[in-house]
Amino acid sequence: MTVFLIFAALITNIILAASIIIMALYGAPVSALVAGASLALVSAIVPVAVDGIKRLRRNSRQSLPEVKDPVPKDMVTMDKALYERCCAYMESKRPFLVESLTLGDLANAMFTNTLYLSRTINACSGKNFRRYVNDYRVEYAMMIFRNNTSLKIAQLSVMSGFHTVVTFNMAFKLVKGVAPSVWCQSVRFGESKAARGKAATT
């Protein structure tokens, strides 16, 4: 491309000089010489510039690398297998009941590193690690409350692995869309209604 530009500049200078000499020989005024030289210069530069742009576009298109799938299929399979193994571990061992559970603890249990596990959880569930763990805690709190509706919110919070009642309230509302107190009342009301209906039929 550099050689091409040098050659184009050389041709342009030759054409410009020839135009000035020819017009001077025929006695053209200075203004006409300048105008003629400018016209000759433009006439020479425009085709060269257009041709150069076309060449540049062709070369840039040819040099673009082929766009490939950013995530290989075997990597997707590995991510899914790890995620399923992680979910099975959470359901069977219930490590989320430990308040101090960290991403490192879960990664060690899965025999992987924290970066890979965090990325896998996010890709497969759309959640970060904290949200992933808290969802299990909320589901567990709901399960134990159905088994014992006399439990208080503070008790549910501690028993399901939450650090504070405030954290439990926030996580529960994020999952269920209502505060845990509202949900618990609806469960109690449902039980009492079912009990009244049973008593009326006996």
Image (tube, rainbow, N blue to C red):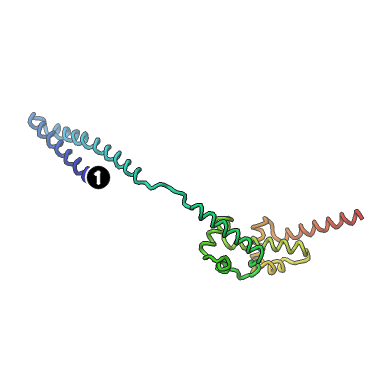
Which corner quadrant holds the C terminus? bottom right
Q: Residues within 10 Å of mark 1 (few under 14, many from 20)?
A: few
In front of the other: 30 or 121 = 121
| Rendering quarter of residue 139 | bottom right
Q: How many marks?
A: 1
Residue 30: x %, y % from top left: 12, 34
Q: Residue furthest top?
A: 26
User: Looking at the image, which residue is at 83% across and 58% down?
Assistant: 192
Which corner quadrant holds the N terminus? top left
In front of the other: 202 or 124 = 124
User: Residue 150 vs residue 83: left or right?
Assistant: right
| Rendering quarter of residue 78 | bottom right
Secondary structure, mark 1, is: loop
User: Residue 89 vs residue 56: left or right?
Assistant: right
In front of the other: 55 or 22 = 55
User: Residue 53 vs residue 34: left or right?
Assistant: right
Q: Which residue is mark 1?
A: 1
User: Residue 125 vs residue 155: left or right?
Assistant: left
Residue 80: x %, y % from top left: 57, 56
Residue 191: x %, y % from top left: 81, 58
Amino acid at circle 1: Met
Q: Residue furthest front?
A: 74
User: Looking at the image, which residue is at 22% across and 35% down?
Assistant: 42
User: Looking at the image, which residue is at 23% across and 46% down?
Assistant: 2
- Please, is residue 135 above or below residue 65 in the view? below
Residue 189: x %, y % from top left: 80, 57
| Rendering quarter of residue 29 | top left
